[in-house]
Amino acid sequence: MQIIDSLTNQGYAFSVDHGDLVIKYTGQGQPDPATVKPLLEQLKANKREAIAYLQRTPVTLYQRVSDELGWLWQPGTREWLEKNRPDLADAIDQADAAANEAWLACEDGTGTIEAFRQALEQWRQANLRAIQAYRDTMPLSLAAADAAEIEKGREQLRRKGYFRMHSRALNERIAIIEHDRYRANVPQGIPVYTLNEIRLLQESVEAGHIVTIGELRQIHAAKRELKGAILK
C-alpha cells in the first residue's frame, strides 16, 4: 500500500492490535510535518483498507502467531527438547528456516503472501507439537488450578446442572455435570465429566496412579474416543 510504504520510509512503523491500527514513529529526530501530515490524513481516510493490508503482511502474520506461542511456551522447553526430543527441536528449526525464506521471498517480490502463510503455519504446528510433548512430562500441578475452577463453578452446577471451563491440565474446554441426566444439556462436541469422575481422577492423582499431564491426557483421549466413563 503506497501510503504505508511512504510513511515507513519517513520512519513510521505500523501494526494491528485487536482490529485497531497502531502507528509509531521510530525514526531519528522529528518527522517533517509538511511531508507526513498529508500522508497521515490520507491514511486516516483509508484506515479500513490499511488495516486489511497490514493483516496480510508477513510481519503482522508472524506477530500474531508469535504472540500465541509466547503464551504457551514454558521455560525450559527448548533445553528439554534438545536433550529428549531432538527430532522436534530439528523440526522447529527447519520450519523456522522455511518461514524465514518465504518471508524474504515476499519482501523481494519472488514469493507470495499465501506461501508465507503456509510456511508460518508449518512453523506454528512444529512449535505446538513440541510444546505439548514437553507439557506431557510435567507433574500434575496444573490439576490444582482445574480443581479451583471446579469449586468456582459449583453455583452454576446447582442452577444449571452443568458448567463449562477451560482445563489447564488438558489444555481443552470441558463440561462438568452434576449427574448423568444433565449430559443432554451440554452442547455437542464438548467432552463431559461427571463430578464423580472428577473425584475418582483426583483420588488417582493423590494416590500417585496418575503422575504427569501426559498420563491424564491419555485417559482423556480414551474416554473421548470410546465415549466411556471413568470407573473405580
Image: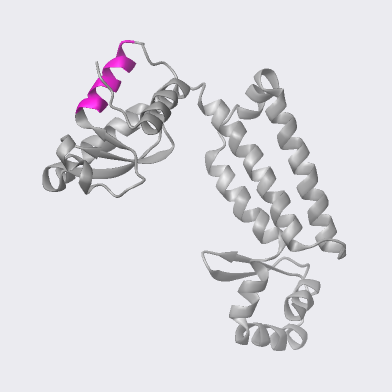
User: Residue 116: x, y in percent?
Assistant: 74, 56
| Lateral position of residue 135 relative to residue 90, left or right | left
Residue at 34% x, 43% y is 190
Corner quadrant of residue 218? top left
Residue at 66% x, 60% y is 60
- Look at the image and give the residue range highlighted in magenta: 196-207
Report if residue 31 is visible in the image. Answer: no
Color theme of the render: one colour
User: Residue 36: x, y in percent?
Assistant: 73, 83
| Lateral position of residue 33 relative to residue 17, left or right | right
Report if residue 208 is visible in the image. Answer: yes
Q: In front here: 82 or 189?
A: 189
- Does residue 95 belong to the magenta stretch? no
Q: Which quarter shows the N terminus?
A: bottom right
- Does residue 199 belong to the magenta stretch? yes
User: Residue 25: x, y in percent?
Assistant: 69, 69
Residue at 67% x, 87% y is 42
Q: Please determine whether, in this image, residue 12 is positioned above or below residue 130.
A: below
Chief secondary structure of the magenta portion = helix
Q: Please determine whether, in this image, residue 176 is positioned above or below residue 140.
A: below
Residue at 56% x, 26% y is 134
Give the residue at the far front of this rendering.
Answer: 226
